[in-house]
């Protein structure tokens, strides 16, 4: 019985730990998207104030 419980625990942890990689990928993509938007706003402000 103890071996069966240990087996299910290992299987459960292997599935849940893989989801961390998915979340990490989402946050990395979000970080780069935020950098892109910040750069876009900065360029837009630069062009707006340069014309005046």
Image (tube, helix red, strand yellow):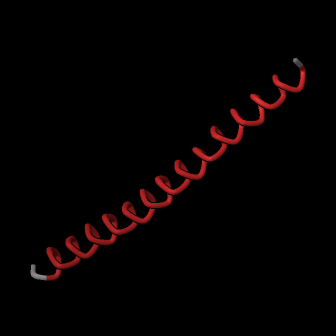
Q: Position of residue 38 (x, y in %)?
A: 34, 65
Q: Image check: 25 left or right of 4?
A: left
Residue at 17% in and 79% down: 47
Residue in front for this viewpoint, 2 or 32: 2
**Quick check: 7 above or below 42?**
above
Q: Image check: 42 left or right of 3?
A: left
Residue 36: image quadrant is bottom left
**Quick check: 32 above or below 2?**
below
Q: Position of residue 27 (x, y in %)?
A: 49, 53
Residue in front for this viewpoint, 24 or 40: 24
- Quadrant location of the C terminus in the rendered image: bottom left
Residue 29: image quadrant is bottom left
- Quadrant location of the N terminus in the rendered image: top right
Residue at 69% in and 33% down: 12
Q: Position of residue 14 (x, y in %)?
A: 70, 42
Q: Image check: 2 left or right of 33?
A: right
Q: How many marks?
A: 0
Residue in front for this viewpoint, 9 or 28: 9
Residue at 63% in and 38% down: 16
Residue at the extreme bottom: 51
Residue at the extreme right: 2
Q: Position of residue 20 (x, y in %)?
A: 60, 46
**Quick check: 21 above or below 3?**
below
Residue in front for this viewpoint, 39 or 27: 27
**Quick check: 52 above or below 16?**
below
Residue at the extreme top: 1
Residue at 25% in and 76% down: 43
């Amino acid at each position: 019985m103890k071996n069966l419980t240990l087996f299910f625990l290992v299987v459960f942890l292997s599935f849940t730990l893989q989801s961390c990689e998915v979340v990490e990928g989402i946050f990395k993509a979000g970080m780069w998207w935020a950098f892109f938007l910040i750069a876009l706003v900065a360029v837009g402000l630069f062009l707006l104030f340069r014309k005046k």
